[in-house]
Image (spheres, rainbow, N blue to C red):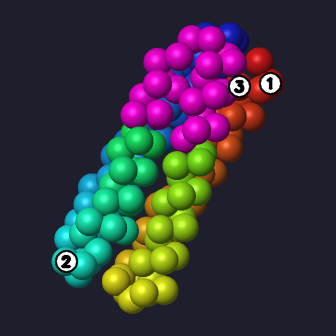
Amino acid sequence: MAETNKQNLANSTLVIYQKYLDLVYYTNDLCKKYPKSERFALVQEIKQSLYSGLRTLMYAIKSYSKQEKLKHLNEFDIQLNLLKIYTRLSYKYQYITMQNYSSWSKRITDICNMLGGWIQSCLKR
């Protein structure tokens, strides 16, 4: 039974990792549409948050200590919340369309939901 739980956790971390990579690809494609005036402002913040989140996710996947894993997962949650804010700003300033906003937000929300489940599973152990 314990091995099944470990296997399910490993599979879920792989899913969240793959979904996050898809988010990175999608975000990089969207950032190409921004005006040049924003390339060194909002786009830089988006990419910094995106790559920082990827680094934090990798640390969380590789952590063995429950406390350390939770610390990294909470940092990852903060990075995702920042991405949500940057997404809203991008739509508000009309750098992206409603369709882009909807798709981008859905991807981030899916990852947030997976992350919430991962945090809950860490707290139960």
Residue depicted at x 62% and y 19%: 68
Residue depicted at x 53% and y 58%: 82
Q: What residue type is labelled 3?
A: Cys
User: What is the spatial separation of the Cα atoms under label 1 and label 3, in whole angstroms?
Assistant: 5 Å
Q: What residue type is labelled 1?
A: Lys
In the current view of this chain or complex, which residue is farthest to the right? Answer: 124
Please name the residue that numbered disc 2 is placed on. Answer: 36
Q: 7 and 103: which one is in front?
A: 103
Q: Within the magenta stretch, is there residue 36? A: no
Q: In this view, does 73 lie above or below 29?
A: above
Q: Which amino acid does label 2 sit on?
A: Lys
Please name the residue that numbered disc 3 is placed on. Answer: 122
- How would you rate the neighbour count of disc 1 (Cα within 10 Å): few for under 14, some for 14-19, many for 20 or more? few
Q: Earlier in the sequence, mark 2 or mark 3?
A: 2
Q: Give the x, y percent position of residue 64.
A: 57, 11
Q: In which quarter of the image is the N terminus?
A: top right
Q: Give the x, y percent position of residue 39.
A: 24, 69
What segment is highlighted magenta in the picture?
55-76
Q: 61 and 53: which one is in front?
A: 53
Please name the residue that numbered disc 1 is placed on. Answer: 124
Q: Is residue 24 above or below residue 91?
A: above
